[in-house]
Image (cartoon, rainbow, N blue to C red):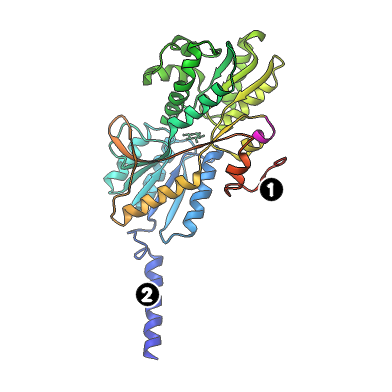
């Protein structure tokens, strides 16, 4: 009898310690805080869903907050999580530079910071970076356009991500690596950026030079900005600048907007357009022949790498890294994940057979 009572008491003790966090490794209400940039870009809903799947099976207490494109909300989110006692902050910044102040607060409070997908720049307060290989994302896009171009004089339209996102530079750098030699040899003619034309003989661009081009062709990661820019570009050129068009679109959301504009123009006889993220809506566009490719970044891997890293840190271990990214202040130890190009030909294998999406999510998938 005594034994049973002791066992019962023990169980109650363990349960209460776990619920107040003492057994789960953390010191407060929450062990790991996750801050994502916005719910308005489908990419981050994918990441949230992946984190939620992992959280279900972990003993650690995790909270996910969204910043809705506001550096102020982002800072408040970080402060809230610090107050709740987090040990590790996983943060994908809305604005790379402005997020520095928030993570400096985290560091002052003894919290380890993992920059997630987007690097926070200009601060020493970033301990690790978990990311896809973003230069290779841009290279995959550029290479796709190159592989589908024949002859010379093919019209090339360039678009980029937000200037406040460090990734926009990495994607553009990768794309430029592949496209610039083919602009130089006459395969492509850039139609929508005087800044890019002015720099088209340069194989490697400085950050300032990239800023000039990106500043001109940025979508701000916003569907409406992408749409109105594409409309303005097609209005500004003549029918001879259209025909079969080659379009560097920086991600899936903006690709769909830009593709719709090009598809509606009577002088556009066809187009090749890039994208990234394998968003469901773009997978459907690829099946329907309205978007040519996407770069699949498996958010299952990124989210689980970030969580595994956070848990290693809580356990007092040094997480393993395989790359370094310069954030303008320090070289941040990084873990990098490769990406996969998806077209109509391999969409089933990469996205359905791999269990990422269900076949029933799409129409017309053979
Ligand atoms: C991410 C992309 C995403 C874009 C817009 C980038 O930093 O790497 O996957 O499409 O932001 O949210």
Q: Is residue 163 visible?
A: no
x, y (%) of residue 183? 50, 13
The residue pinned by badge 1 equals 360
| Whether residue 148 is situated above or below residue 356 in the rendered picture | above
Q: Check if residue 196 falls in the magenta segment.
A: no
Q: Is residue 249 above or below residue 76?
A: above
Quadrant of image for the N terminus: bottom left
Q: Is mark 1 within 8 Å of ligand 1?
A: no
Q: Which residue is located at x 51 percent, y 41 percent? A: 44
Which image quadrant: the C terminus? Answer: top right
Q: Residue at x 32, y 49 (%)?
A: 319
Provide residue 289's location: percent of width, then percent of height: 68, 30
> Taking 39 as reference, is 228 above or below it?
above
Foreground label between 2 and 1: 1
For marks 2 and 1, the one nearer the N-term is 2
Q: Is residue 171 in view?
A: yes
Q: Where are the magenta residues, as a range? A: 285-289
Q: Is residue 149 left or right of 95 when viewed as pictured?
A: right
Q: Which residue is mark 2?
A: 13
Determine whether the residue tagged by mark 1 lies in a helix, strand or loop: helix
x and y percent of residue 232 in the render?
Answer: 60, 15
């Amino acid at each position: 009898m005594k034994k049973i009572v002791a066992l019962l008491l023990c169980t109650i003790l363990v349960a209460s310690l776990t619920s107040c966090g003492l057994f789960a490794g953390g010191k407060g209400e929450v062990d790991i805080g996750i801050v994502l940039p916005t719910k308005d870009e489908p990419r981050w809903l994918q990441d949230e869903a992946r984190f939620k799947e992992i959280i279900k099976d972990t003993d650690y207490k995790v909270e996910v907050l969204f910043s809705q494109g506001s550096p102020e909300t982002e800072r408040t989110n970080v402060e809230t999580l610090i107050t709740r006692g987090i040990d590790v902050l996983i943060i994908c910044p809305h604005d790379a530079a402005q997020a520095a102040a928030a993570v400096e607060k985290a560091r002052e409070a003894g919290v380890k910071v993992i920059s997630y997908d987007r690097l926070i720049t200009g601060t020493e307060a970033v301990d690790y970076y978990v990311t896809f290989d973003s230069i290779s994302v841009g290279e995959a896009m550029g290479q796709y356009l190159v592989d589908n171009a024949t002859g010379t004089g093919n019209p090339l339209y360039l678009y980029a991500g937000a200037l406040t996102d460090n990734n926009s530079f990495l994607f553009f750098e990768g794309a430029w690596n592949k496209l610039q030699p083919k602009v130089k040899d006459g395969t492509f003619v850039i139609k929508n950026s005087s800044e890019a034309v002015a720099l088209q003989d340069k194989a490697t661009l400085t950050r300032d030079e990239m800023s000039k081009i990106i500043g001109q062709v940025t979508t701000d990661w916003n569907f409406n900005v992408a749409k109105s820019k594409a409309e303005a570009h097609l209005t500004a050129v003549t029918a001879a600048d259209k025909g079969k068009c080659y379009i560097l679109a920086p991600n899936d959301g903006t690709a769909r907007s830009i593709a719709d504009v090009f598809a509606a123009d009577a002088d556009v006889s066809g187009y090749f357009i890039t994208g990234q993220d394998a968003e469901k809506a773009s997978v459907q566009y690829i099946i329907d022949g309205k978007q040519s490719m996407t770069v699949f970044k498996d958010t299952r891997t990124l989210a689980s790498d970030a969580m595994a890293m956070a848990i290693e840190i809580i356990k007092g271990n040094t997480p393993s890294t395989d790359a370094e990214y310069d954030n303008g202040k320090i070289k941040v130890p990084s873990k990098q994940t490769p990406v996969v190009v998806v077209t109509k030909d391999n969409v089933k294998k990469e996205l359905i057979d791999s269990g990422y999406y269900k076949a029933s999510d799409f129409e017309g998938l053979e």
